[in-house]
Image (spheres, grey):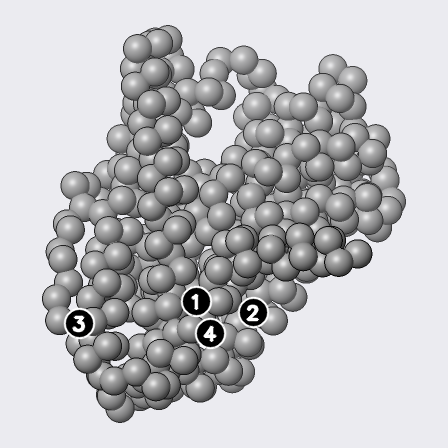
Amino acid sequence: MSGRLKACFASVFTSIVGRLFIAMAVGVVIGRFAPGWTIRAINSFGGTFAQFIKFFVPFIVLGLVAPAIAETGKGAGRLLLVTMGIAYASTLFSGALAFGVVKGLFPSMLASGSLAEMSAVRTFPAYFVLQIPPLMGITTALATAFIFGLAMVALDLPSLKQTFDEMRSAVAITITRALMPLLPFYILTVIADLTASNKLAVVGGGCVTIMVTALGVTTAVLLVQYAVAGVVARRNPFRALWNMVPAYLTGWGCCSSAATLPVTLRQTRKNGVSDKITDFVIPLCSNVHLAGSMANMVVYTAGFVVLGGGQIEVGAYVEFMLMLSVIAVASPGIPGGVVLTSATLAETVLGFSPERYALVIATYMALDGMGTACNLTGDGAIALIVDRFAGKR
C-alpha cells in the first residue's frame, strides 16, 4: 500500500495539474512576503512569456490544422461529412448552452467590476517585457491552414504534406518541452502579482463560482447529448452514459484526448457500436468534437468579462464560438491546448488584455481535465448516432 501511495503522490507532483497547484501555492507565498522589486522582476518573465504565447499561437494553428485537414483525405465520403457535421453542431450547441447560462447567471452571481476596481490598489510594473510580434494574425493562420490543407487533399502533394508533418512535429515538441514546462512559472507570476496587489481574494471567490458553473454546464451537455443519442439509437441513455464513465474519469486524470483514446474506443464498443464505426468516429471526433472545451471557454471567459466590469455581448461570443470551433482542432492531445490556442482570439474578439487572459489560463488549467472528459464522453454519443444510420451500410 505504501508503494502505491508513494506512486500516487509522485504522479500528482509530476502531472501538469499538480505542478500548477504547486505554482499557485508558491505564488501566494511570494506575493504575500516578497518585496516589491521581486514582484516586478517575476512580472518581467510573465510579460515576456505572454508575448511568446501570442507569437506562437499562429504556428500552432498552421502547423496542426493543415495536416489534420490533409489526413482526412478523400475517403469515407458522406460518412466523414456527416460525422464532422454532428461533431461541430454538438460543439456549437454546448457553447450556446454555456452562453445562455452565464448570460443569465453571472451578472448577479459575480461582483461585476471588482477586478477592475482592485487593479488600481497596487501595481508592480515589469522592469522590461520583450516584445515578440506574431508573424501573422490568428485569422490569417487559419485561412492559410485551410488553403494548404485542402490543396494537399485535392492535389495529393506528398512533399508539401511531409513539410507540414515536420512542422507539426516542431510545434508539438515546442509545446511539450517549452510551453508546458514553463507554464507553471507563468501561473506563479500571475498569482504572485494578484496576491501582492491584494486582488487574489476577489478573484479567488469568483474563480470558485466560475469552476462550479463550468462543471454544471459540462454535465448538462453530456445529459443532452446522451438523451439525443438514446432517442436516435434506441438505447437506454443512462446505461450508455454509465458505460462511458471510465473514459470520463481517464480524461479527467490525464487531460489528453490522445492518451485517453484507447479507453474511449473500448467503452464505445461496450455500448454496442460496431467496430468499424467505432474505429472511424472516435479518432475523428477526438480532433473535431470539443463540446466540453467550448463550454468551459465560454464560462471562464465570460466570468472574467463580468469580473472586469464588462458586458457579455452576444455578437462577440457568436464570433468567438464560431472561430473557436475551428481553431480548437489545433489542440487535441495537448493539456491546456485549447486555452493556449485561444489567447489571441480572446484578445481580438473579446477584448482581453494579456494580463487578464492569464487569469483565464490559471483557472482553466486548474480543472483542464473537465473539458477533456466531456469531449471524450460526448464522442461516444456521436458514435451511437452514426452507428444507427450508417453502421449497417
Q: Residues within 10 Å of mark 4 (few under 14, many from 20)?
A: some
Report the amino acid beneath label 3: Ala
Residue where numbered disc 4 is placed: 25
Q: Nearer the viewer, mark 2 or mark 4?
A: 4
Report the amino acid beneath label 1: Ala
Q: Nearer the viewer, mark 2 or mark 3?
A: 3
- Could you tell me if residue 5 is visible in this image? yes
Quarter of the image that includes the N terminus: bottom right
Relative to 240, residue 192 above or below: below
Q: Quadrant of residue 189?
A: bottom left
Report the residue at 25% width, 85% height from top: 35
Marks 4 and 3, the one that precedes in the sequence: 4
Q: Is residue 264 left or right of residue 62?
A: right
Marks 2 and 4, the one that precedes in the sequence: 4
Marks 2 and 3, the one that precedes in the sequence: 3
Quarter of the image that includes the C terminus: top right
Depth check, front residue: 390 or 112: 112
Give the spatial CA distance, label 1 vs label 3: 19 Å
Give the spatial CA distance, label 4 vs label 3: 21 Å
Give the spatial CA distance, label 4 vs label 1: 5 Å
Residue where numbered disc 3 is placed: 126
Depth check, front residue: 195 or 120: 195
Depth check, front residue: 127 or 155: 127
Asked whether disc 4 touches disc 1, contact meaning CB atoms under 8 Å apart, the reply is: yes
Residue where numbered disc 2 is placed: 211
Relative to 195, residue 74 above or below: above
Q: Nearer the viewer, mark 1 or mark 3?
A: 1
Report the amino acid beneath label 2: Met
Residue where numbered disc 1 is placed: 23
Give the spatial CA distance, label 2 vs label 3: 30 Å
